[in-house]
Image: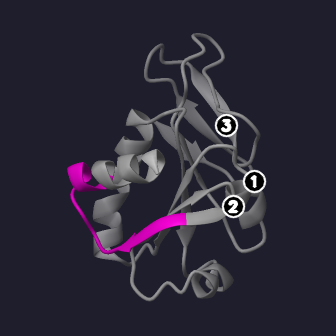
Amino acid sequence: MRSQTKDASIVRCSKCGRKNRLPRAASGIPQCGDCHQPLAWVTEAWDEDFSEVVEAARIPVVVDFWAPWCGPCRMVSPALEQVAADLAGRMKLVKVNVDEAPRLSERFAVQAIPTLVVIDQGRVVTRRSGAAPAPALREWVDDALAA
């Protein structure tokens, strides 16, 4: 379970069930306040806070450029959230709505959505466009994290 505000997400720990508040930008790796297991870190970013939320992250970030009106984007989103849960503590998933962040869309030359970009320590590691099934997305992210 996840709910989102402009400042933080509320994430239920998959191990013990405790609800945890996760800031959109923070140093380190989020852990459950009770059992200390890594938490799936899924959040959003906009033009004005992308640097703080994504580029300053200490773990690799998968950026999902999407739009609410895009059918393939809506199909990919649950698969990406599952990958983030499976790789909790190893990656962060940040969703960028292209309609609300036009400067980021331009900066990353997003011409089709969904477009996924892996950023590690402020640099682009890899990118892909288009929908893919969950196993293909997991393999792509695993390869990017290994690079």
Q: Is residue 51 magenta?
A: no
- Between disc 1 and disc 3, the foreground one is 1
Q: Name the residue under label 1.
A: 56
Q: What kind of element bears circle 1?
A: loop
Image location (x, y in percent) of residue 108: 57, 80
Image location (x, y in percent) of residue 16: 48, 13
Image location (x, y in percent) of residue 112: 39, 84
The quadrant of the image that shows the N terminus is top left
User: How many discs mark residues in the rendered view?
Assistant: 3
- Residue type of the residue flagged with mark 3: Leu
Label 2 near label 1: C-beta < 8 Å? Answer: yes
Residue under the point 72% across and 74% down? 47
Q: Which mark is residue 71?
A: none
Front-lying residue, 27 or 125 = 125
Q: Earlier in the sequence, mark 2 or mark 3?
A: 3
10 Å neighbourhood of mark 2: few (<14), some, or many (≥20)?
some
Q: Which span of residues is magenta-colored?
A: 125-137
CA gap, disc 1 to disc 2?
7 Å
Q: What kind of element bears circle 3?
A: strand
Q: Earlier in the sequence, mark 1 or mark 3?
A: 3
Q: Residue 22 carries which label?
A: 3
- Residue type of the residue flagged with mark 1: Ala
Q: Is residue 136 magenta?
A: yes
- Residue type of the residue flagged with mark 2: Gly
Above or below, 92 against 38 in this view is: below
CA gap, disc 1 to disc 3?
16 Å
Q: Residue 122 carries which label?
A: 2
